[in-house]
Image (cartoon, rainbow, N blue to C red):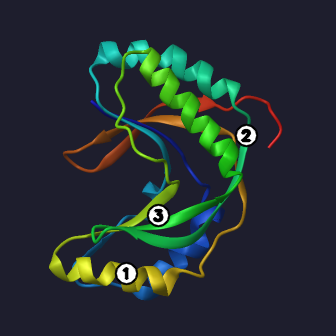
Amino acid sequence: MRLFVSLEPPVEAWAPVADAVTELGQVPGVRWSPPTRWHVTLAFLGELDDDDARRLAPPLRSAVAAAGPVRLRLAGTGTFGTSVLWAGVAGDVERLSSLVAGVAGAARAAGVGLEERPYRPHVTLARAAGRGGAGALGQLADQLASVSGPTWTATEARLVRSHASDGRYEVLEHLPLGAGSP
């Protein structure tokens, strides 16, 4: 099963961004991600079998419980090359980075290898779905650059299964963040 760990912004946190995206309408070559699937990935775990997932759960619970709630907001936009349009995540990014490091440590402790790359907190808004889309993402990032959402407090992370067959996400476990102050 294909797994990741994420934070899910509440509706009120992403609604202003979703409204701005809706105003843009359909863009040739661009496949918009539905706002109900927007999330901030903490770690992409890849394909794991049931045994790997069972081994991962206890250290993951401990790592997330050791972190306190995190105050964040969606702000700014950008692209990853010509393939992904994203909304940035602002707020207590230092605490968020610490949470990400804890989740990565838990995964490694459970024997799950993670891809090594710098962490850039974001929410994926759209993907290029053809050559026309690749050229459009930069313009869309410029059009959405000033859009932001209100601050929200993330109080739980989620272990999520991604179903490649239909693009559906299934929350396998809710992981409460510890009681530290935001």
Helix, strand, or loop for circle 2? loop
Residue depicted at x 42% and y 15%:
110
Read off the residue under disc 1.
138
- Mark 3 crowd level (few <14, some 14–19, many ≥20, 10 Å Cα): some
Helix, strand, or loop for circle 3? helix
Q: Is residue 160 above or below residue 64?
A: below
Give the CA distance from mark 1 to mark 2.
33 Å
Q: Nearer the viewer, mark 1 or mark 3?
A: 1
Give x and y (percent) for residue 113. Answer: 34, 26
**Residue 65: quarter of image:** top right
Q: Which mark is residue 69?
A: 2
Give the CA distance from mark 1 to mark 3.
20 Å
Placement of the C terminus among the 4 image quadrants: top right
Residue depicted at x 68% and y 46%:
94
The amino acid at mark 3 is Pro
Classify residue 162 as left or right of residue 166. right
Classify residue 180 as left or right of residue 13. right
Read off the residue under disc 3.
35
- Mark 2 crowd level (few <14, some 14–19, many ≥20, 10 Å Cα): many
Q: Is residue 99 visible?
A: yes
Dot 1 and dot 3 residues touching (CB under 8 Å): no
Give the CA distance from mark 3 to mark 2.
22 Å
